[in-house]
Image (cartoon, rainbow, N blue to C red):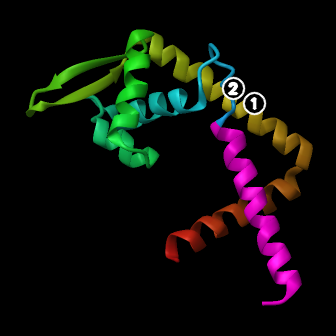
Amino acid sequence: MSDSHEEVTRTIMDAFFQFRRLHRHHKSPIMGMKHNEVMVLFRVKEHGGTNGARVSDISHRMRVTSPTVTQLLSKLEEDNLIERTLDPDDRRSMRITLTAKGETIIQKAEHAFFARYSSLVDALGTEKSVLLTDLLFESIKHFREN
């Protein structure tokens, strides 16, 4: 491997790590919530349907452990953003649904995320934004296949 290849590889790694940290530690503009708390609400909505989401659905989608999700759910339940009920099909399991307050938070978060990424498109311009999107999807495909 040449020095320039290694240098480019390290630069790409650094950029991905910085981007990941930026999102993990970013405070949501919604009620000062943490990014992971908002992501759990999105996953509850995504998997909720009529019966509600299961902890395993959320943890699998977020790629974190069930205890991590359970901790986040406890905080969200305390804030009256979600409700937990026994799964009618499996009494050992819980189903999670959004409350009306949780639905409102999701709507605000969707608008805030859109505005944040819209400002990125404004800063980069359309051409670079399309290029960035293409490169990110190619990167995702590469990492999924390798």
Can residue 3 be spotted in the picture?
yes
- Amino acid bearing label 1: Ala
Pointer 1 and pointer 2: residues touching (CB < 8 Å)? yes
Magenta segment includes 125: no
CA gap, disc 1 to disc 2? 5 Å
- In the picture, measured across the screen, residue 54 lies left or right of residue 89, that is right
- In the picture, measured across the screen, residue 9 lies left or right of residue 105, that is right
Can residue 51 be spotted in the picture?
no
Q: Is residue 135 positioned above or below 22 on the image? A: below
Provide residue 126's location: percent of width, then percent of height.
86, 52
Provide residue 35's location: percent of width, then percent of height.
59, 31
Provide residue 106's location: percent of width, then percent of height.
53, 23
Q: Residues within 10 Å of mark 2 (few under 14, many from 20)?
A: some
Q: Is residue 137 positioned above or below 7 on the image? A: above
Q: Is residue 4 positioned above or below 50 on the image? A: below
Residue drawn at (37%, 42%), measured in percent from left and top? 59
Residue drawn at (72%, 41%), measured in percent from left and top? 22
Element carrying mark 1:
helix
Q: Residues within 10 Å of mark 1 (few under 14, many from 20)?
A: few
Magenta segment includes 14: yes
Q: Which residue is mark 1?
A: 115
> In this picture, which residue range is highlighted in magenta?
1-24
Quarter where residue 82 is shown: top left
Quarter where residue 62 is shown: top left
Taken as a whole, is the magenta stretch helix, strand or loop? helix
- In the picture, measured across the screen, residue 61 lies left or right of residue 53, that is right
- In the picture, measured across the screen, residue 122 lies left or right of residue 100, that is right
Q: Which residue is mark 2?
A: 112
